[in-house]
Image (cartoon, rainbow, N blue to C red):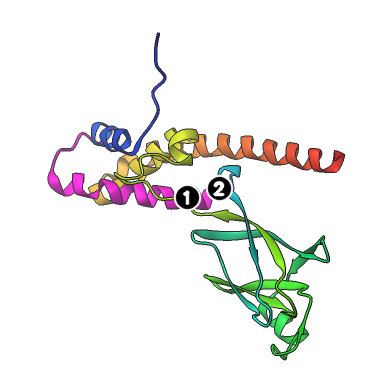
Amino acid sequence: MTVAQVMTYDSLVNDIRTYLERSDTATLEKIPTFIMLAEQVLAADLKFLGNLTVVESTMVQGEAVIAKPSRWRKTVSMNITVAGKRQPVFIRKYEYLREYWPDAAETDVPAFYCDYDYDHWLVAPTPDADYSYEVLYYQRLQPLDSSNQSNWFTQYAPQALLYGSLLQAMPFLKNDERIPMWQQQYDLIVNVLKTEDVLRIGDRQAVAKDS
């Protein structure tokens, strides 16, 4: 029986070495960097369900600034539970929140939120109780390395990760003539993944409407 091959960090490193046909130390030492850069580009190119995450926590009475989860990338939605019922907290610009609720010492049920900085949200009004809240957000995947052999990319987008890594290697190797080839392969796979994800999101929305 043939066993399906699954990409790991180590197998990806070996594949990159094979495709590049290089064995010099300078290039081999850069392979982890090529992979890291490819992961970042892929994460920017794809809004995929694999990195869509829900976190539940509790707002603290009198504190308008809330810490975001580690590896947060982008917020999709926020809601709080008030008297046993969930209600949305709507996204607005920072300036809107400051104008809407200029005195942070005053408290009420939070109605709006914004990105205060990369690591925190700001809510307004300032919470008047310890409200439970839920946030749906896109997270950065745990980066690949020798101690973390797999993630969503290795499981569901191995070709895109390989071609993306090879594409990142070309400027270092000053091999500009091969950039179009790897770019074409990368774009082809990424477009397929984007199409699949649009269909999944469409199915999800249809289910939500029918529920």
SS category of the residue bearing label 1? loop
**CA separation, marks 1 and 2?**
7 Å
Q: Nearer the viewer, residue 42 or 53?
A: 53
The circle drawn on residue 12 is: none
Image vertical order of residue 102 relative to residue 52, above or below? below
Q: Quadrant of the N terminus?
A: top left
37 in the magenta segment: yes
Residue at image position (61%, 43%) is 49
Q: x and y percent of residue 9 in the render?
A: 33, 39
Residue in front for this viewpoint, 20 or 126: 126
Q: Position of residue 96 (x, y in %)?
A: 73, 80
**Image coordinates for residue 93, horizontal then vertical, percent:** 69, 75
Q: Amino acid at mark 2?
A: Asn
- Secondary structure under tag 2 reads helix
In contact (CB < 8 Å): disc 1 and disc 2: yes
User: Which residues are the magenta region?
Assistant: 20-47
Residue designated by label 2: 51
Q: Residue lying furthest left in this view?
A: 24
109 sits left or right of 150 in the view:
right
Amino acid at the residue labelled 1: Leu
- Please identify the dominant SS of the magenta region: helix
User: How many discs mark residues in the rendered view?
Assistant: 2
Query: What label sits on residue 141 in the rendered view?
Result: 1
Q: Is residue 83 visible?
A: yes
The mark nearer the N terminus, 1 or 2, is: 2
Please report the residue visible at 43 percent of the width from the left and 34 percent of the height from the top: 158
